[in-house]
Image (cartoon, rainbow, N blue to C red):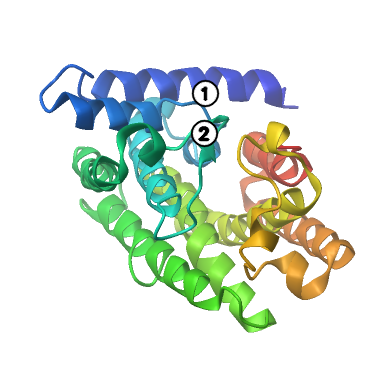
Amino acid sequence: MVELAAYMTAQRARIDQTLDRFLPPAQARPAVLHEAMRYSVLAGGKRLRAILCVAACEAVGGSVEAAYLPAAAIELLHAYTLIHDDLPAMDNGTLRRGKPTCHIVYGEANAILAGDALLTMAFEWMARCTPRPPWPPGQLIQELAEAAGSQGVIGGQVEDLAAEGRPATADAVEYIHLHKTAALIRAAVRIGAMAGGAKETEFEALTLYGGDLGLAFQIADDILDATSTTEALGKTAGGDSIQEKVTWVAVFGLDAARQKARALVDSAIAALAPLRRKAGALEALARFMVDRVS
C-alpha cells in the first residue's frame, strides 16, 4: 500500500530540485526573462504530470533517476501552457497557484517570451534523455511534441477559445478535454514508461490508463471550478461560467460529471492489471486526482 501523501511530497521535492538545478539562474542575462521563467515554474503546484511520469517509470521496473529530467521537461511545457492560457488574449487570468499570473507581474510581452522560452527548453531537456530499449532514441521528444502540438494541447486550446459563448455540446467538450488536458497527462505516463523500458503490454496498459485519467482529471477540474472557492483553487473560481466555457458540467450537469469522472478512474485503474502490484502509486494517484479539493 502506497502512502500517497509521503510519496507525493518526496517526489515533488526531487522534481523541484531538478527544475531549480537546470533552469537558468534568475540573474543570468536577460534577467527579466529568467526571473519570469523561474517565477512561473517554481511557483508551487502539485507536479502531478511529473509525478505520474516518475510513477510510470517505477511501475515498469525502471530506475526513477531516469525519469526526473523527462518529468521536469514536462513541467516546463505545462508551465508554458499556463502562462499563455492566462494571457489577456486567451483567458485573461490574474491569479495562478495563489499568486499573480506571469503577465501581471512581468508584463504581457515578457510573459509571452517566457512561455516561448519554457516550451523551447522543454525540448532541449527532453533531447538529453534516452529511453531504455526497446524504445529508440528520439521517441521521448516525439511523444512530447505530438502531445503539445496542433493535434494536442494547442489544438485543444484553439477549440476551447472558438467554443466560448456558443451552445455547449458533448462533441466539443470531449474534443477540448482530450486534447487540451488529457493529451499531456497521457504523454507524461507514456514518457515515464519509455524511460523505464516498458514492455509492449505494459506500455499499452499505461496508455489506456493515461488517457482515461487525463479526461477524468479535467472533468474533476470542471467540477471544482463550479463548486470550490478562489482561495482553495489558487485561481479565480467560477471562471468557466463567466467566460461561457464548454465544460463537462455545462453539458451534462454536476451529478453526471461526478459519475463520469468516477467511471473513468475505475477504468484507468482496471487498465493497470497487467502491471500487478507494481502500480500502487499510479492507482493511488488516480484516486487522488478526482478526490482532490484544489
Q: Which residue lies furthest to the right in this view?
A: 255
Residue 85 x, y percent position in the rendering: 44, 53
Considering the image in quadrants, where does the C terminus appear?
Answer: top right
Residue 26 x, y percent position in the rendering: 23, 19
The number of callouts visible is 2
Residue 4 x, y percent position in the rendering: 69, 26
- Would you name the residue on which mark 1 appears? 11
| Residue at x 75%, y 27% (from the top left corner) | 1
Q: What residue type is labelled 1?
A: Gln
The crowd level at tag 1 (other Cα within 10 Å; few <14, some 14-19, many 20+) is: many
- Front residue of 62 and 67: 67
Rendered view: 154 above or below 121: below
State if disc 1 and disc 2 touch (CB < 8 Å). Answer: yes
| Residue at x 45%, y 37% (from the top left corner) | 101
Between disc 2 and disc 1, whose residue precedes?
Answer: 1
Numbered label attached to residue 47: 2
